[in-house]
Image (tube, rainbow, N blue to C red):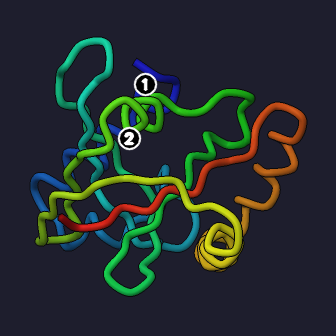
Amino acid sequence: MSFLERQPWVQQHIDLYQSDPVKAHLHAPGGRGDPMPSLLLTTTGRKTGQKRSLPLIYGKAGNRFVIVASVGGAPDNPVWYKNLQADPDAEIQVALDHYKVRARDAEGAERAELWALMTQIFPPYDGYAKAAEGHREIPVVVLEPV
């Protein structure tokens, strides 16, 4: 279980998605700040093969959903991102809607465009990128419905 998954507010957000998905969709992470759009990402664990869910802030670009693998600028990528690298097929819930998606990393000009979109939604991503400098470039992940 990752650091993020151990945070009590994460499980509370997952529980809220199960009981009141409309309310969970616009949510303040950790109960602080302004509500932001969040989805519930379900990946398959690369080691366990078990389904794992996590709420994440997202943006929308056309029919694509965009998420950022920041972990607050930690030196390593999050577990959910590693799971998507091993198996890019996943599921998301966005409010009441459910989608099967395939994940891929945004690169080049697309990454720059989507990074700008995501920092408008959640400005701390820029600080997270500075914290991660020298360790990794924070992945911008595109989730495309299949």
* Element under disc 2: helix
- Label 2 amino acid? Val
Disc 1 marks which residue? Answer: 6
Which image quarter: residue 5? Answer: top left
Task: Tell which of 88 and 81 is nearer to you.
Answer: 88
Amino acid type indicated by mark 1? Arg
Q: Which residue is mark 2?
A: 10
Relative image position of residue 100 (x, y in whole percent): 16, 58
Say which residue appears at 64% left-offset and 67% top-offset.
111
User: Residue 12 appears at what percent x and percent y?
Assistant: 29, 43
Identify the secondary structure beneath mark 1. Answer: helix
Quick one: which residue is furthest to the bottom in this view? Answer: 62
Cβ atoms under marks 2 and 1 closer than 8 Å:
yes
The structure residue drawn at horizontal position 56% and vertical position 46%, both measured from the top left corner, is 69
Q: What's the CA distance linking mark 2 and mark 1?
A: 7 Å
Provide residue 131's location: percent of width, then percent of height.
84, 42
Which is more toward the observer, 93 or 66?
66
